[in-house]
Image (cartoon, rainbow, N blue to C red):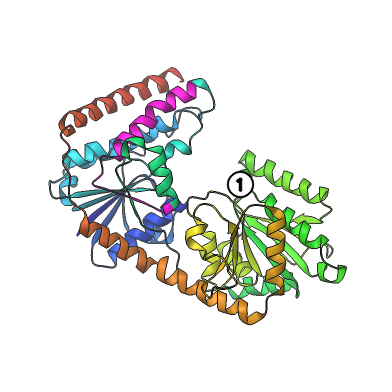
Amino acid sequence: MKIAFIHPDLGIGGAERLVVDAAVSLQEEDNEVTIYTSHCDRTHCFEEVANGTLHVEVCGDFFPTNIKGRLHIVFATLRQLWLCLWLVFSGEIERYDMFVLDQLPYCLPLLHYNKRSDAKTLFYCHFPDQLLASHASLVRSLYRKVFDTIEEFTTGCADEIVVNSKFTRSIFKKTFRSLAHITPQVIYPCVPTAVELEESSVKEVSTFLNGSDMFLSINRFERKKNISLAILAFADLLSSLPEQKRSVLKLVLAGGYDARVRENVEYLIELEELCAKLQLKSITLRGNLSTYPKDRNVFFLPSVTSDLKDSLISQCQILLYTPSFEHFGIVPLEAMRQGKIVLATDTGGPLETVENFSAESKSWTGFTISSDHIEWSAVMNQVLQMDPQTKADAGERAKKRVYVMFSRKSMQLRFLETFEIMRPKRFSYEPYLAQTVKIRFIFYALFAYYISQSLT
């Protein structure tokens, strides 16, 4: 089978990781796979792209992505339409049996109308784009309303729609009212089931802990990640313990951080201030973990490497996953594959990845509870008191769950099963719609040219 993936920007985000994993897994089954994208920096991409494992074609990168920080969605649409028009007019569109799109559905009508009649189109919905975009001002709300309507309509022009979780499926049906008759299939993202720990990183973490018990949180430093929940719960836990036990506990808050992003900078400061208010002694480490005052018990680690992240996970007592209503959540799986217990909120993706604790059950792998810091503190204490065998058994179940449900092989099988049952559709309005899309493309191109000229 000849398969074409169409993705806006092939960087190093979560959506890109899924596209790369899906493409590699399908290629391993002797399918011919090409990824078409509007941008790909070979120095800032995943290894499978950089080393040529995957064939990547870039088209339309000469278009700007915005004008003075605005009109992102206009140019994203324009870049995708240009890419698809190139596929059409170059004749490349005739080569493929399957088209897999994600993030942006805007070119689906054009693609669907011009593909071979036996070819199929699949749209992978990570989350409705309109729910991720700001609608703050009246002007922006009106501007987004147009694209929100187009997003809903064009999403429905795929032969098949899949989502990354049952939670996303529920949001999909609530958001896209005109598509309520569609129940998307779920194809979960995956993680590598085997982890090779870097010896130097393992030693660095071991020296850093020096026999202490570590609670670990891994998230980007953004307010929506609710990292303060881990700090509040840790403070509650310490207040309930005698001094001797308090002194051997550490809370490590690691994750993505970019000094150029204002929210990252502001939120880290807010978290440091929260620690001070709760009389916790915190420090932000950006270098070697072994250099810090020994009286500290809360550690902020901005922008840790993958090796250090995996080594931290391997030596933590429990992973604290603080966000609510996450679309899916990869970090819990990264902990579970190393046999670690996960504590998460009882919302969103973790309800599907983590099997909740029950005293009567022998299948639990972690805890999903409300985002109340007192409840979190109680669970953290419960895990501290658990006997090693109970933890080990839960860890083995977690590893097995990842292998069965969230491995690359399981994702590959779900894609292949979906491809098999798909049937090409034909919409009565396609000829008219395709012409409309072409006209809109010409309008966008002229509009973009006018704006760029007026600003020079």
Relative to 92, residue 31 above or below? below
> Could you tell whether 355 is left or right of 24 in the image?
right
Q: Is residue 286 visible?
A: no
Relative to 156, residue 71 above or below? above
Q: Of residues 448 and 357, which is closer to you in this image? A: 357
**Quadrant in which the N terminus appears:** bottom left
- Estimate the x, y position of residue 19 in percent, counting from the top left: 37, 55
**Quarter assignment of residue 428:** top left
- Estimate the x, y position of residue 305 in percent, counting from the top left: 59, 61
Task: Indicate yes or no whether the magenta region holds residue 156.
Answer: yes
> Could you tell whether 398 is left or right of 381 in the image?
left
**Quarter assignment of residue 381:** bottom right
The residue wearing badge 1 is: 258
Q: Residue at x 15, y 31 (%)?
A: 431
- Estimate the x, y position of residue 364 in percent, counting from the top left: 54, 70
Circle 1: residue type: Asp
Q: Residue at x 28, y 37 (%)?
A: 107
Relative to 144, residue 245 above or below? below
Q: Which residues are magenta?
A: 139-166
Q: Secondary structure at mark 1?
A: loop
10 Å neighbourhood of mark 1: few (<14), some, or many (≥20)? few
Q: Residue at x 61, y 41 (%)?
A: 260
Q: Of residues 371 and 212, which is closer to you in this image? A: 371
> Could you tell whether 139 is left or right of 313 in the image?
left
The residue lying furthest to the left in this view is 117
